[in-house]
Image (cartoon, coloured by chain):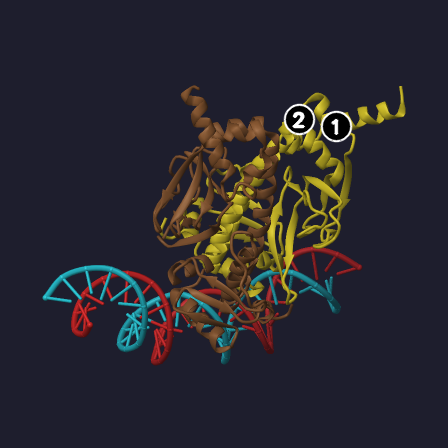
Chain colours: A brown, B yellow, C cyan, D red
DNA sequence: CGCGGGATTGAGCCGAATCAATGCAGGTGG
DNA sequence: CCACCTGCATTGATTCGGCTCAATCCCGCG
């Protein structure tokens, strides 16, 4: 058996046991198609805080989040930065059809990525219409979510933004990568972001984020254990808090 | 010659003289491919203020802007609305792969659209990979622009937002659908939006938008003739005003 | 020329930013 | 094992930008 064949088998075995195989973009592919991606796949690991790539740098690769949380930031001219996206297991990231990355990508937690060289990936896209279609669908829905998020950030006050943020995280909890809480009404969340990162995601200051959490606690909507563990006591009430006139 | 054939020729003639043919998504198609779209094309006209479709309504058709300006709004639970997109000649709009429209579309000015029934269009997409690719590229860049715009709206103050808005319109002026101004440094713009619509686009109130225009005039960056005609006197200075620390 | 609706201007208020101090937890070294 | 240190988080006092409410203006139109 040739070395190439052996590597391919190893690669294939890795895909078949991949925790995100059935939810990531590669779900669109089967058999020989997945082999195509497999043959250019390379895993990468990052520590919390690592920069994956910088805004403006060369767009080398496209990646799928295997485990952990990544974020995308835009730098403002005055040096502030704003987080424009959070990426969880099975999400993809990368700058398609462009030489330069247009956002900075960072590891928010320890992170495992499954990476593909961009140009080879783009060639593969051209020959795998089902993959391009799958990504098209995902980008359409990301655009839709970004528009909704834009409206939330521009129009809602600090408390509502924080509530929306918690509800977004709670929705991630409903996904197959997080186990459900026993108590049906309460939902436990581990905040992936520091207060500073949360502020940068919500367009607020650290102090305002902190005060908003305090208000949510005083209103009896959440409890906290330390600074990262949040329990949503009443999802309905929190939803009303985020959308008072809904 | 059959009636069908005659219609197709008429349709074809219309496409070949279409002002946006070479800049809209249909630029990706040639010959028999464009015939495919042609055969399902129907023109529609709207008056300024008309609703094209309502958020939540059935997603009937995909459209290309032939002339005029359209916008996309999201309704907030409390009744306010926010404009999440402006569409100019050659842009496309519509909800792909979804039964329901997720935004309201309105004619901001008198408007001509070139429309395609959604389901037939989606079938065509599946069989015209170059069209799907073209739309994929456009949606990727719309996502990118939406992220940039989000940062502007969340992080910049009223005056900077208005300046950014004017610069965005000025950039549209650079496009093939608007003639250049004679004076190289000055740029004339016709505001497509009322103050109220501008406020809804910028996440401000009418009063604040109005005051911001006044400040730009006092700062000597623009002059105005009536309420719709703006002349940018110094694009560089306006850019600095929008991005002080750039 | 007068009317109406959008636009402008003004006064006061409110929510989030800023500035400043204190609290707390996790890690390190005595 | 405890004391200290460092970085993150919380809380408080003050400021400021944009919203609200209210009055007037002006442009386009009949």
Seen from the viewer's position, the closer of residues A187 and A2 is A2
Does residue A50 appear to the left or right of B69 in the view shown? Answer: left
| Residue A221, label in figure | none
Seen from the viewer's position, the closer of residues D24 and A69 is A69
Number of marks present in the image shown: 2
According to the image, label 1 marks what residue? B36
Q: Secondary structure at mark 1?
A: helix
Image position of B210 with respect to B127: above or below = below
Q: Are the two marked residues, 1 and 2, in contact with CB atoms closer than 8 angstroms?
A: yes
Q: CA distance from mark 1 to mark 2?
A: 9 Å
Residue B195 location, x and y as percent?
60, 58
| Residue shown at the point (71%, 41%) measured from the top left | B62
According to the image, label 2 marks what residue? B29
Q: Please, which chain is the residue tagged with disc 1 on? A: B
| Residue closest to the far front | A1
Which is more N-terminal, label 2 or label 1? 2
| Residue closest to the far right | B2
Residue A70 location, x and y as percent?
43, 49
User: Which quadrant is the N terminus of chain B positioned in?
Assistant: top right
Residue C20 location, x and y as percent?
27, 73
User: Which picture quadrant has residue A233?
Assistant: bottom right
Does residue A7 appear to the left or right of A153 in the view shown? Answer: left
Image position of B42 with respect to B245: above or below = above
Q: Please, which chain is the residue tagged with disc 2 on? A: B
Residue A97 location, x and y as percent?
50, 33
Q: Secondary structure at mark 2?
A: loop
**Disc 1 residue crowd, few under 14, some 14–19, many 20+, Cα 10 Å:** some
Residue B173 in sight in this render: no
**Disc 2 residue crowd, few under 14, some 14–19, many 20+, Cα 10 Å:** some
């Amino acid at each position: 058996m040739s070395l190439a064949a052996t590597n391919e088998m190893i690669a294939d075995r890795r895909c078949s046991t991949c925790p995100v195989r059935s939810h990531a973009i590669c779900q669109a592919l089967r058999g020989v198609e997945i082999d195509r991606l497999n043959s250019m796949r390379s895993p990468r690991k990052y520590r919390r805080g690592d920069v994956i790539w910088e805004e403006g740098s060369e767009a080398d690769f496209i990646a799928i989040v295997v485990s952990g949380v990544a974020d995308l930031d835009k730098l403002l001219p005055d040096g502030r930065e704003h987080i424009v996206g959070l990426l969880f297991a099975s999400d993809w990231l990368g700058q398609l059809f462009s030489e330069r990355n247009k956002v900075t990508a960072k590891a928010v937690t320890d992170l495992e990525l499954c990476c593909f060289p961009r140009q080879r990936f783009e060639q593969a896209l051209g020959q795998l219409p089902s993959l391009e279609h799958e990504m098209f669908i995902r980008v359409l829905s990301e655009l839709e979510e970004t528009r909704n998020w834009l409206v939330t950030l521009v129009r809602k006050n600090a408390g509502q933004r924080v509530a929306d943020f918690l509800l977004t995280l709670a929705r991630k909890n409903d996904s197959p990568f997080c186990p459900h809480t026993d108590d049906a009404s309460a939902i436990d969340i581990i905040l992936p972001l520091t207060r500073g990162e949360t502020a940068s995601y919500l367009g607020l200051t650290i102090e305002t984020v902190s005060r908003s959490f305090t208000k949510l606690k005083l209103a009896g909507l959440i409890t906290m254990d330390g600074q990262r563990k949040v329990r949503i006591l009443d999802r309905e009430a929190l939803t009303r808090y985020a959308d008072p006139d809904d």
